[in-house]
Image (cartoon, helix red, strand yellow):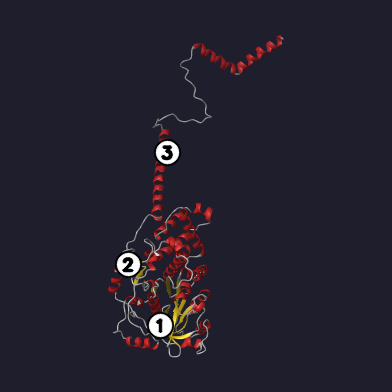
Amino acid sequence: MDDQIFIGGGGEAYGEKQGLKLKYANRHGLIAGATGTGKTITLQIMAEGFAAQGVPVFLSDVKGDLAGLAKAGDSGFKLHDAFNSRAGTIGFDDYSYQSFPVTFWDLFGEQGHPVRTTVAEMGPLLLARLLELTEAQEGILNIAFRLADEQGLALLDLKDLQALLVWLGENRAQVALRYGNVSVASIGAIQRRLLVLENQGAAQLFGEPALELPDLMRTDIDGRGRINILAADKLMGAPRLYATFLLWLLSELFEQLPEVGDPDKPKLVFFFDEAHLLFEDAPKALVDKVEQVARLIRSKGVGVYFVTQNPDDVPEDILGQLGNRVQHALRAFTARDRKALRMAAETYRDNPRFDTEEAIREVGVGEAVTSFLQKKGVPGIVERTLIRPPSSQLGPITASERKALVDASPIAGKYEVLKDRESAYEILARRAEVAAKEAEVAEAAEEDAEVMEREFKSARRFSGARVRRSSSRPQRSSRRGDTVGEALGKALVKELRGTTGRRIVRGILGGLFKGR
């Protein structure tokens, strides 16, 4: 099965090989089933199959079991005989134990290479989802991101965003003229949500160096695809952070990878475990975003496989795009369970040998109802399939084995040291410092001016003439230089301006006119 991923055996005696064609592996898929029915082992053997065909894989290890992909199985394992017996039943003739090339990642940097992104790359939509913001608060977050772009403020980590929100609150009056009302209460609510996020350890997610996607798409020296395992056991304590991070990673793959059409095999296969966390209480805008990514990312050569307990955990519009399906047993204890079981059965092409709904209810552990895309992308007839045994170790590895693999990784040392270059926090702090100094100088100058005015009025300072208003009278010159004649002339003019002077003038003028 050179062009397929061997999944297991179907048919009457499980002797018919069932496989997923590599050509249609980018048409996405679903692994579903109740707890304890074998979903994790199915995920493990599919990751092995893709890696063996040179396809890189990304998956999250929720329980720690999938770390065993890095180590070959052992003949001393308690299920060794059972595995070999199953391999013989399904015709897995070349079954053997082997390890696979693995790269370990961890958002907290404890069980693998640190995974980081920047606040700007996360974007306001996903960040609002992560912070559980209201519509009004999300609007303010969008304003903050727009202002950061306009003013060249790099948003790298949480302290950058926190500093920008403080600046936004202080300048809300000017900002409101262009973008609308900015509430201090809403800004405070966002800051509190950021504090909660910090307490959950999410501050380590944001910063540089940010993850470079080519590091997820590496192949080993022997041509096998590397399996990227995200340690998610601790991360599941913050389920919204877990789901938002995986959705961000999926969005980055969609935005950055080039179009490749329909390749002979995928460029990357992405397993989204505990997929119900992505859609619980998700706003319509976010669900629409996931649907868009799922619909278009296949042309980028990426196959997305959702892993969840029940198919109805995935919205119908997205579920309709998942062409390759492995359905483990579903338990129908309630009316809702029976309805979900019936709806799950109706999505498969009927097989005349058995009733699909009954088969989904009855398949045992390690067995599943499967359907894979066939020629021209047509869904295959549903089949009861006995899942093949894993070649790698079933279960976790030791901490020392994990550390040795991390140290020997081809990207060892690339992401371990956090870099803190100049960004919004430093720029705004410098602006605030300059503004504070300018305000201090202006305040000192004002105080000096007040002191000078006070001393001038109390006649203790004579630094120059007072500046008078233009309407004030000119200062009279001193009389010390007047001669006797000038003094008499001025006295006469003064007298003539008075009442006696006016009488004398009237008498003189009257005499002149009478003479005429």
Q: Earlier in the sequence, mark 2 or mark 3?
A: 2
SS under mark 1: loop
> Where is residue 310 drawn, in percent x and y?
47, 80
SS under mark 2: loop
Q: Residues within 10 Å of mark 3 (few under 14, many from 20)?
A: few
Q: Earlier in the sequence, mark 2 or mark 1?
A: 1
Residue marked by disc 1 = 38
Apparent side of residue 201 relative to residue 190 in the rendered image (left or right): left
> Where is residue 323 drawn, in percent x and y?
49, 77
- Is residue 202 something one can see in this rendering? no
Q: Earlier in the sequence, mark 3 or mark 1?
A: 1
Q: Name the front one of labels 3 and 1.
A: 1
The residue sitting at 32% across, 67% down in the picture is 410
Q: Is residue 99 above or below residue 256?
A: below
The residue sitting at 52% across, 67% down in the picture is 285
SS under mark 3: helix
Spatial distance from mark 3 to mark 1, Cα to Cα? 84 Å
* Residue that extends furthest to the top in the rendered view of this protein: 515
Residues 100 and 445: in front is 100
- Is residue 379 something one can see in this rendering? yes
> Where is residue 126 drawn, in percent x and y?
46, 65
Residue marked by disc 3 = 450
Find residue 445 and report its image quarter: top left
Q: Residues within 10 Å of mark 2 (few under 14, many from 20)?
A: few
Q: Amino acid at mark 3?
A: Glu
Q: What is the number of the mark on residue 410?
A: 2
Spatial distance from mark 2 to mark 1, Cα to Cα? 32 Å
Q: Amino acid at mark 2?
A: Pro
